[in-house]
Amino acid sequence: MTPTTRTLLTKVSTATLCTALFKRGLRNQFIQDVRPLNPNLPNMVGEAFTLRYIPAREDLNPISVFLDRNHPQRKAVEDCPPGAVLVIDSRKDARAASAGAILVSRLMVRGVAGVVSDGGFRDSPEIARLTIPAYHQRPSAPTNLTLHQALDINQPIGCGDVAVFPGDVVVGDAEGVIVIPAHIADEIALEATEMTAFEDFVTEQVLGGRSIIGLYPPTDEQARTDFATWRAANGR
């Protein structure tokens, strides 16, 4: 992902990105049932670095597994690159935590752009006070070991019914999280930026009392002329 694309994606909504992806036939890129712990943070943007859990088997997943310095959960936290987003496949099961405040704090200090789980986080009030964007299904106090066994790092996963490949571009806002295939991220960012300019114009017009007929979409020539004038006046 180029620095320009990253900057553009910080200024567009997941809703607009969904529409841009839908135009290309991609209908299932919005991660289901995850929400931001702090919806007031700026957009989360980064390339996906993944962690996958499987159902825990008790004889293989005692608390002593954390003595292993290469335990996949701990290793993922230490290996996730700065600027990336750690995306966790927790099988949509929030009965046990995907991680807690200490691990998320470590990600934040290391410069990771955000963390997403289709399960839950423990210590969620503490995570909500951090400056790293974090998305989950709902709070979950039990340790991940009770239900989840960390297995794969940086392999293709499913998160909230969306396929996530390492390097895909992940964007989160106050509504949720969307996954953009890496090879079209640049063009999607440009198109979404253009769409956002037009939507801002339309919103201003509608709040001023204008009908959406002929305006949204701009089937009337006057709407297109007015938009061009608005862009020039607003530097958009």
Image (tube, rainbow, N blue to C red):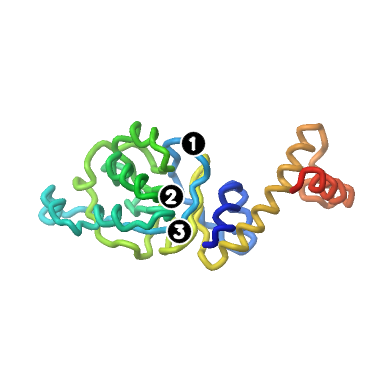
Point out the tag, 1 or 2, that comes first from the N-terminus: 1
Q: Is the residue under label 1 in contact with that under label 3 (CB below 8 Å)? A: no
Q: Identify residue type, mark 2.
A: Ala
Q: Residue at horizontal 77%, vertical 43%?
A: 234
Q: Identify residue type, mark 3.
A: Glu
In percent of width and height, residue 152 lies at 28, 62
Spatial separation of the CA atoms under disc 2 and disc 3: 9 Å
Q: Which residue is mark 3?
A: 47
Q: Which residue is mark 1?
A: 39
Extreme residue toward the right, this view: 222
Spatial separation of the CA atoms under disc 1 and disc 2: 15 Å
In percent of width and height, residue 169 lies at 49, 58
Q: Is the residue under label 2 in contact with that under label 1 (CB below 8 Å)? A: no
Q: Residue at horizontal 36%, vertical 58%?
A: 50
Q: Quadrant of residue 153?
A: bottom left
Q: Identify residue type, mark 1.
A: Pro
Point out the tag, 3 or 1, that comes first from the N-terminus: 1
Q: Nearer the viewer, mark 1 or mark 2?
A: 2
The disc placed on residue 113 is: 2
Task: State whether residue 156 is above or below residue 89.
Answer: below
Q: Quadrant of residue 34?
A: top left
Is 199 displayed left or right of 72 in the figure? right
Task: State whether residue 221 is above or below residue 201.
Answer: below
**Dot 3 lies on which element?**
strand
